[in-house]
Amino acid sequence: MFIGSLQTEPDPTVAGAFPNPGNLTTQNYADINERINLFQGLLNSGIFTGGVILCTVVFGVLAGYSLAVLQWRGREATFALALLVQVVPFQLLMIPLYVMIARDYGLADTHLGMILPFAINSSAVIIFRQYFIQVPKELFEAARIDGAGELALLWRIALPLVRPAMLTVILLTFIGPWNEFLWPFLITKEASMQPLAVSLANYISNVAATASNPFGATLAGAFVLAVPAVTLFIVFQRYFTSTNLGSGVKG
Amino acid sequence: MTAVATPGPVTDPGSRPRRSRGARGRPFGRNPLGLLFSAPYIVFVLAVFAYPLIFSVWMSFQDYFFSAPGAQVDRPFVGLANYEQVLSDPAVWRSFGNVGIFLIINVPLTVVLSLVLASALDKAVRGRTFLRVSYYVPYVTASVAVVGVWLFLFNGNGLVNQILGPLAPDPSWLVNSSLAMPTIALFVTWKQLGFYILLYLAALQNVPKELYESASTDGAGRIRSFFSVTVPGVRPATLLVVLLSTITGANLFTEPYLLTGGGGPNGASTSPVLLMYQKGLEQGTPDTAAAIGVILVILVLGIALLQRRLVGGDES
């Protein structure tokens, strides 16, 4: 992909998969940047993704903790709900959500409208619950006897213990909104609000046909879009196995 | 459900026996704070899942159309008219058929490839990390980005056709009405594989090693123990993989939209979600789009129940 993004002329032969110094240029990056503002796109993707991650972690920890550690009426029902929600395909909600968020609340072309449907992720709640369950209950009991309130308990004892879960959730959540196409595509019509995935897709379907080296430019944009996710994955790849909910620390 | 003698429960090792004492006399249970902590999540689920779901069903029975925000308009109840309109539309049938083709290719291929690759990866000692990264990179990369590469590979004079030479299909892959959907199914299978491999890797950790030992004591070879220990051992994971890949198929949108320029030759790769987008937002008939959505949900639920019957397995 990277090599293709540097080629002046698309080279569809097998040799084209290897760099050829005579055929390399950064022109494609300039070309795509001219059509779609790469920096603005990255910024929008970043705001969208960051907002989703923040909400997911804060509310996911709270819900996961209360589902795993606290005894309250409706706990079982809430957990069942969390499992059920995962089976509802998001796209089936797209028409009513579009009507609600874009038409009724007027949130089209805003970051809030983009973030809202993804703000809390049920899988994150379930992952946090699993990790909190594995924390020995005696730890919590001891702290309670020492007079710690639930919030202090959560902040000082539970959170430090589930740090790997936190990282897992952040990484998994990152992939979703960063790569999400359909929803931001529906509600952003202004180019200046579009995340990179959306502007790149629009480029592929509308502009590419008229460009001088459409594949080069497309691949250049694709490369810019792919690098953050792939880098994060390679750096933190051992945490991706931590989603192995069955193992981990045994209490 | 068929009771399977699963050696190790894959799910929820830490779940505790339900506690009923302490609930009496306290209207919200022992720790009412729990409700407060979960409240944002519950409100969110009701607002972003339950309400739109009901709204969607309601909309499918109305003559619903877009209007200026706040304007009072009459949206009469039309009964099953939207459904009649949808079901008499050949494009809708075509799109459901396309998902059928997609699932027939994608689901078995996903299950077989990811299980085999996961067990190979589980045993591999050298190059493990490299292999895992190479399976997983397509999954973490945006569809939109990878589609660019596939367009480059599979277009009329792309790399694949250059290699195949005269064997290349005549209307090329993505503009060929009988090959467009299978190509998309392959694309999605390849892209999602890393995720399912990871799921199976997790499940494999829960298959007790003693079972493999006793199998080899009984004289079972590698292949035999794969089928009699591994396959039943990861059955709950298989059910999950089948279910998730079915849901992915029902949600198909980005790939047909981008790979085949919005539905392909004669709607050969139009998916129901793509059709919902076209009807609901491009043509301004959200009511028929909602009706397609409701039919799709019912079909997915039906298929999911059927798969549970066929695959069996524990509650996951």
Image (cartoon, rainbow, N blue to C red):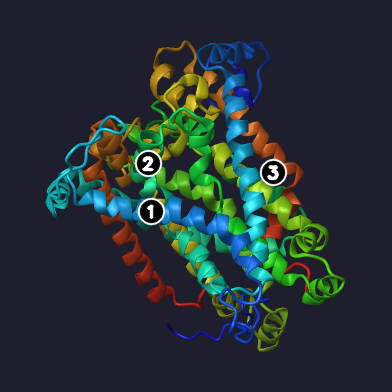
Name the amino acid type tagged 2: Met
Q: Within 10 Å of the Cα at label 1, are there few (<14), some (14-19), or many (20+) other Cα atoms? A: some
Q: Is label 1 in a helix, a strand or a loop? A: helix
* Residue A144 image position (x, y, % from top left): 81, 72
Q: Foreground residue, A228 or B191? A: A228
Task: Say whether marks 2 and 1 touch (CB < 8 Å).
Answer: yes
Which amino acid does the dot numbered 1 rest on?
Answer: Tyr
Q: Position of residue B35 (x, y in %)?
A: 59, 65
Picture residue at 43% right of the left edge, 38% below the top: A182
Q: Mark number for residue B51?
A: 1
Residue most extreme to the right: A146
Host chain of mark 1 = B
Residue at the outermost bottom position: B218
Chain under numbered label 3: A
Q: Position of residue A90 (x, y in %)?
A: 43, 50
Disc 3 and disc 2: Cα gap in Å?
A: 35 Å
Chain at numbered mark 2 = A
Residue under pointer 2: A100
Compute the Cα span from label 1 to label 3.
35 Å
Report the disc number at residue B239: none
Vertical placement of residue A43 versus B85, above or below: above
| Residue named by callout 3 | A233
In the rendered image, residues at marks 3 and 2 fall on the same chain: yes
Q: Is residue A11 shown to the viewer in this render?
A: no
> Secondary structure under badge 2?
helix
Residue A76 appears in the rendering: yes
**Badge 3: few (under 14), some or many (20 or more) residues near its Cα, within 10 Å?**
many
Identify residue type, mark 3.
Answer: Phe
Occupied quadrant, residue B7: bottom right
Q: Residues within 10 Å of mark 2 (few under 14, many from 20)?
A: some
Residue at 63% over, 32% down: A46
Residue B88, position as x, y percentages in the image:
12, 48
